Image: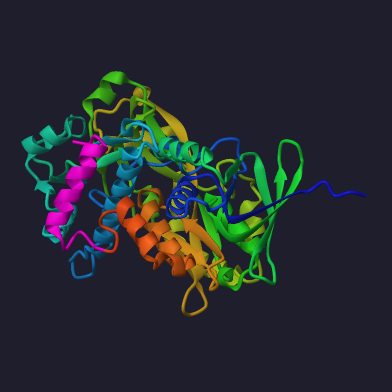
Amino acid sequence: MSDNTIRSNSEVVLIGAGIMSATLGVILKELQPDIKIEIYERLDVAAAESSDAWNNAGTGHSAFCELNYTPEKADGSVDPKKAISIAEAFEVSRQFWSYLVQQNKVPSPENFIKSVPHMSFVWGDKNVKYLKTRFEALQKNPLFAEMLFSSDFEQLKQWMPLVMEGRQPDEKLAATTMAIGTDVNFGALTRSMFNYLEKLDGVSLYFNHEVQKLKQRDDKSWRIKITDLGSGQKRKAYTKFVFIGAGGGSLPLLEKANVPEGDGYGGFPVSGQWLKCTNPEVIAKHQAKVYGKASVGAPPMSVPHIDTRVIDGEKALLFGPFAGFSTRFLKNGSYLDLPLSIKANNLIPMLSAGFNNIPLTKYLIEQVRQSPKDRIKALREYLPSARSKDWVLEKAGQRVQVIKKGENGGGVLEFGTEVINTHDGTLAVLLGASPGASTAVSIMVDLIGRCFSDQIKTPEWEAKLKNMIPSYGQTLNDKPELLTEIRKQTSEVLKLK
């Protein structure tokens, strides 16, 4: 009996057609134009899960407005370290996107990025004090030097008229604003990058193809078994390096790879919903991303915010996200995803993380039980004049928060983005959620440094990286003049204010 399995060889296989795979594919192709890359995606289009515009906040996450990146310490102080590292990473993304635009590798920047001010907004004495402390900790850093703070009622009305509608002058309110904030359509950007990649020699992109098995061979290369979901045709792909960037689908694939570095990892799925405004007059009154403080026990992805969005040329207004719980790891996943992900090597971390995060469980139960009236009540904390008839509920993306082994063998629930790679650098996996897409370029450059450690040290690769990212190898927060120059240049190329 003949075997009609298709076989292929490449240097790199990317699993999942989201922003991470697109970014890694483009960077590798720039560094080594003759590199052979195969990309496999389970769905029929690129960027249909976490990268899609309706499945994420669209915020160019630069820590200008997200309060969860600057938690308050027990003594009332605020540590700006995490905010600074995220702001640095977003500047790297802006440089890389500018390079792609300048080189005509992606079309007009208006397709994927717009200027939208980033604001933090709080109420009550304690929160106003915290926001002032945060402002003082951040604003002395060059990355945040343009940040403004105000608790003046008339000033706040100028910054965010819709949010201030129906409020009283004696209310304790405060906000910060950064005029250089952005709204990013990561779906449009991702698809533009794949359109560019597909035209290059040595790149093959397969949609409707699902990875079934991964196995490392004796020579350290990988054999990947894939099924064409349309025809049922089987494939075997042989490659030196595998990147798994499949969003919520990454954890099951990491388990299939059966590498020691994957031991103890689990995932906790959190789904999301938005309230979307349907009244053009209301949409026109707001021009900002306004972030507030999360409820006690809420995951960072559930920090409430009222967002101006520009999606496919249309201005939109969203509020949320409202968290939910589903056992699916992907919006287009299976209800068996969570139970099937529980294995002998991650059972204790999973149970331990569940036990140690009772407030999160309680919060999710409360969110799932919310009525339409409850959601409008939450919206009115931000827009007191909101009318329920102007808003509809939209389903957002599915995120899988990382659970990993802690130092004591128990489980730790992580809310950021985590990259795992094997010690031999032949396999890398991206797990987790925010601020992922916004910092994709830094994450992928770091991954290349770990998995292509010899090549990245060569003068050729270093020169090419500096061409794509002029600040490569430097930090901008301690070089104010370079920061000013780079921001000016990227603003001009990306047509930002």
Observer-nearest residue: 447 or 458? 458
Q: Is residue 97 left or right of residue 454?
A: left
Does residue 342 appear in the picture of this structure? no
Q: Is residue 493 left or right of residue 278?
A: left
Q: Which residues are magenta?
A: 474-497
- Is residue 486 on the magenta stretch? yes
Looking at the image, residue 274 lies above or below residue 357: above
Observer-nearest residue: 311 or 97? 97
Query: Image point 52% across, 70% down: which residue?
Result: 352
Observer-nearest residue: 133 or 247? 247
Query: Image point 22% across, 25% down: which residue?
Result: 285
Does residue 49 appear in the picture of this structure? yes
What quarter of the picture does the C terminus occupy?
top left
**x%, y% of residue 296?**
34, 56
Q: Quadrant of residue 201?
A: top right
Looking at the image, residue 461 lies above or below residue 150: below
Query: Image point 28% across, 25% down: which residue?
Result: 283
Q: What sort of colour scheme is used for the picture?
A: rainbow
Q: Is residue 380 left or right of residue 51?
A: left
Looking at the image, residue 184 lies above or below residue 357: above
**x%, y% of residue 106?**
39, 36
**x%, y% of residue 380?**
28, 35
Observer-nearest residue: 193 or 365? 193
Q: Is residue 267 left or right of residue 219?
A: left
Query: Among all residues in the image, which is located at the extreme bottom?
Result: 408
**x%, y% of residue 411?**
50, 70
Looking at the image, residue 212 lies above or below residue 281: below
**Total numbered labels placed on residues in the image:** 0
